[in-house]
Image (cartoon, rainbow, N blue to C red):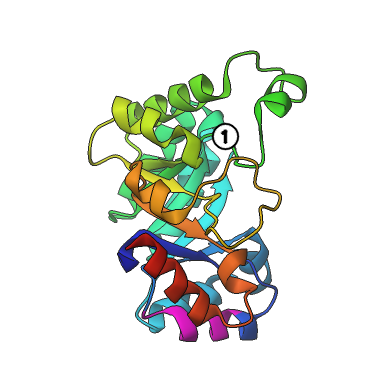
C-alpha cells in the first residue's frame, strides 16, 4: 500500500525536507517536490531524495510553447525523477512535445497531465476561467486528450476518479491530490476525499501534504493513514 502514497514536500528548507524524508521514506512510495522547494534548492533536493533510496515526483506543472516544454522535459528526465507534471491546458501539441523531450533523453520518465487544479470548483471554472462546461466534463476531456498525446496519466481530484477510470485504459495513471484523512479538517482544497475512498475509486497514487508534513509527529500521522487505508 505504501507505493500508492506520495508525500508533498511543501516546505521551505533543506533541513525540513530531510527530516521528513528520513522519517517517512520507509512508509511511502514517492516524495513530491514542487515549485516551492525546487525554486529554493534546485536539483540538490532531487539528488538527496534519490540518495535516500526514494522516488521523486517533480511537480513543476510546465505550461509553455511546445519547444520550450520539450527542452524542459528532457532536462527533467535527465535528473532521473520517476515522474513529473505538465498542464494539459497547454494543448495536445505541447503534451506531445513533452513526450518527445523524454524520448530525447533516452528515459522512461512518466509524464502526468494536470487537468483542473483541486482548488478550482465549478463557480471558479465558470466565473474566473469563463468555461461554461460542467467541471467533470472538462476534466474528462483533458484526461482523454492526455492519453491520446501519450502521457502516462493525469492529476485529478478524487471526485473525477471514477469518471476518468471508466473512460481510460487500465494502466493510465490517476494521481490524486486533495486527499484528507478522516481526522483532518478541510483547508483550501475544494474537492477532497479520504485516502481509503480515493484508492477504492481508482486512484493509482494519492498525494498527501499538510495532514502529514504539518503533524506534530509525521511518522505517526502516516501510520494512521496506512491503517485507515487497510
Pick the residue in front: 29 or 67: 29
Residue at the image position 39 percent from the left and 56 percent from the top:
83
Residue 63 in sight in this render: yes
Q: Which residues are magenta?
A: 17-26
Residue 156 in sight in this render: no
Q: Estimate how packed mark 1 is, as few (under 14), some (14 to 19) or many (20 or more) residues with alpha carbons within 10 Å.
A: many
Residue at the image position 66 percent from the left and 17 percent from the top:
131
**Image spot of residue 135 (x, y percent):** 57, 24
SS at badge 1: loop
Check the image and name the residue furthest to the right: 127
Pick the residue in front: 142 or 203: 203
Relative horizontal placement of residue 132, taking residue 161 as reference (left or right):
right
Relative horizontal placement of residue 27, taking residue 188 as reference (left or right):
left
Which of the 4 image quadrants contains residue 12?
Answer: bottom right
**Image spot of residue 153 (x, y percent):** 36, 41
**Image spot of residue 164 (x, y percent):** 37, 30
Secondary structure that dominates the magenta span: helix
Q: How many marks?
A: 1
Q: Above or below — where is 43 with respect to 146? A: below
Q: Which residue is mark 1?
A: 116
Pick the residue in front: 60 or 106: 60
**Image spot of residue 225 (x, y percent):** 45, 67
Q: Above or below — where is 2 with respect to 116? A: below
- Indicate whether residue 74 is drawn in magenta: no
Residue at the image position 60 percent from the left and 41 percent from the top:
118
Q: Quadrant of the C terminus?
A: bottom left
Pick the residue in front: 4 or 59: 4
Amino acid at each position: 500500500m505504501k507505493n500508492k502514497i506520495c508525500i508533498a514536500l511543501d516546505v521551505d528548507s533543506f533541513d525540513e525536507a530531510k527530516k521528513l524524508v528520513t522519517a517517512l521514506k520507509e512508509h511511502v512510495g514517492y516524495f513530491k517536490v514542487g515549485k516551492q522547494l525546487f525554486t529554493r534548492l534546485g536539483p540538490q533536493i532531487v539528488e538527496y531524495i534519490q540518495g535516500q533510496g526514494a522516488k521523486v515526483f517533480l511537480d513543476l506543472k510546465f505550461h509553455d510553447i511546445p519547444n520550450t516544454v520539450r527542452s524542459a522535459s528532457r532536462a527533467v528526465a535527465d535528473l532521473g525523477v520517476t515522474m513529473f507534471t505538465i498542464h494539459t491546458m497547454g494543448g495536445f501539441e505541447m503534451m506531445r512535445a513533452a513526450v518527445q523531450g523524454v524520448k530525447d533523453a533516452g528515459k522512461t520518465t512518466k509524464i502526468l497531465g494536470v487537468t483542473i487544479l483541486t482548488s478550482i470548483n465549478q463557480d471558479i471554472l465558470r466565473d474566473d476561467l469563463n468555461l461554461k462546461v460542467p467541471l467533470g466534463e472538462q476534466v474528462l476531456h483533458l484526461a482523454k486528450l492526455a492519453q491520446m498525446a501519450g502521457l502516462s496519466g493525469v492529476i485529478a481530484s478524487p471526485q473525477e476518479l471514477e469518471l476518468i477510470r471508466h473512460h481510460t485504459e487500465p494502466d493510465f495513471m490517476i494521481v490524486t491530490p486533495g486527499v484528507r484523512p478522516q481526522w483532518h479538517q478541510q483547508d483550501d482544497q475544494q474537492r477532497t476525499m479520504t485516502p481509503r475512498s480515493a484508492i477504492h475509486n481508482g486512484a493509482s497514487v494519492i498525494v498527501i501534504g499538510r495532514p502529514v508534513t504539518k503533524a506534530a509527529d509525521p511518522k505517526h500521522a502516516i501510520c494512521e493513514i496506512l491503517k485507515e487505508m487497510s
